[in-house]
Image (cartoon, grey):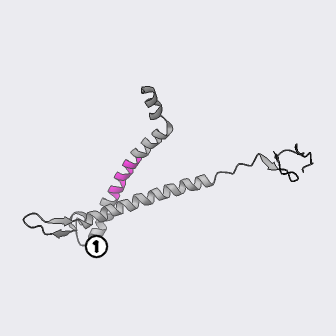
Amino acid sequence: MLKEFKEFAFKGNVLDLAVAFIMGAAFTKVVNSLVTDVIMPPIGLLAKSSDFVKQWGIKLPVPGGDAAVIKIGSFLDSLVQFLIVAFAIFLIVRLVNKMRSSEPAVAPATRACPYCTSAISVKATRCPCCTSQIS
């Protein structure tokens, strides 16, 4: 059982998945910082709020308790983060698709005889089935 687990854990696909997971976690931190520290402060200035994410919301009164808050600013922060990550993934998938489509096509090894339509080698000068001369 340990041998099977070792084979599974160290296959290329599992290691690729682990690396992708770690890179995704690191990328998420970068995007969170970009949105929270770079993108949202100018939006906060436009909304005339120094702390846009925490302060912008709608308070709902709750009888006999604290008011519930719909945090619109926090939602917009998450939405911008999602859009940045989705766009980055789109660009990566697009690049991979371009790389796949630019691979050269493999030339076929056989062709059809023009007389009897049997499959013959591309290099053949005579058909082995009907013995016709092929140019």
| Residue 42 lies in the magenta stretch | no
Residue at figure coordinates x 42%, y 26% from the top left: 2
From the viewer's perspective, tell me whether residue 56 is left or right of residue 126.
left
Up the image or down, 59 lies above or below 122; here it is below
Where residue 41 sits, quadrant-wise, is bottom left
* Count of numbered circles in the view: 1
Along the line of sight, the residue nearer the viewer: 80 or 52: 80
Q: Position of residue 62 (x, y in %)?
A: 12, 67
Q: Which corner quadrant of the image does residue 6 belong to?
A: top left
The quadrant of the picture occupied by the N terminus is top left
Rendered residue at 42%/41% (across/down): 18
Q: Which residues are magenta?
A: 23-34
Q: Identify residue type, mark 1.
A: Leu
Which residue reaches farthest left? 64
Where disc 1 sits, the SS reads helix
Residue plotted at (26% across, 63% down): 74
The residue indicated by pointer 1 is: 46
Residue drawn where x is 49% and y is 55% of the image: 92
76 on left or right of 127: left
Say left or right for 17 vs 50. Answer: right
Q: Main secondary structure of the magenta part?
A: helix
Position in image of residue 35 (x %, y %):
33, 60
